[in-house]
Amino acid sequence: MWTGFESIKLQLPAEVNEKRIGIITGELGKKVLLPVIKEMNLIKGLKLDIISVSNTFYGREVTVTGLLTAMDIKKKLKNYNLSNKTIIPDIVINEDGYFIDGRTINWLRRELPCKSISICSDLNDILEVIVDE
């Protein structure tokens, strides 16, 4: 997901309208995301939060993002100070639109107060969410 950041950096705006965006990831993904998020948080008006979700479906020793469930994400976001938008990586949803626990993104939207959830597969998708007014 984060390959090609150097070329994307050239497309980053210097400023956006004030917004806070949460990015869902597994615990392992947080380590990979941190340098990219720090760089992107230099954009005036933007606050990106890494939201690291523990896997209770398979057990906490499973730390990859691709095996997160909709329920694990819901549990994490239930008491979280929700952002204007939340980004979920496409790797957690199969080609039929289901999380590994059989739930859909629409189920998750109904369960959470933050209805603005974007599914992103790469940095270009995230850039679209950032510049979207």
Image (tube, rainbow, N blue to C red):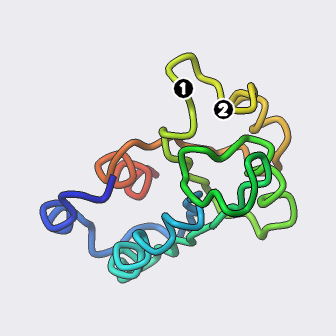
Residue receiving disc 1: 94
Q: Secondary structure at mark 1?
A: loop
Give the number of callouts: 2
Horizontally, is 9 left or right of 22 in the view? left
Q: Residue at x 87, y 65 (%)?
A: 79
The circle on residue 111 is none
| 120, 113: nearer the viewer | 120
Q: Name the residue located 77 percent from the left edge and 50 percent from the top edge.
A: 72
The disc placed on residue 99 is: 2
Residue 111 vertical placement versus 35 (above, below): above
Neighbours of disc 1 within 10 Å: few (<14), some (14-19), many (20+): few
Mark 2–mark 1 Cα distance, whole angstroms, equals 6 Å
Callouts 2 and 1 close, C-beta under 8 Å:
yes
Determine whether, in the image, residue 1 is placed left or right of residue 64. Answer: left
At x 72% / y 55%, what residue is drawn?
A: 55
Where disc 2 sits, the SS reads loop
Q: Which picture quadrant has residue 127? A: bottom left
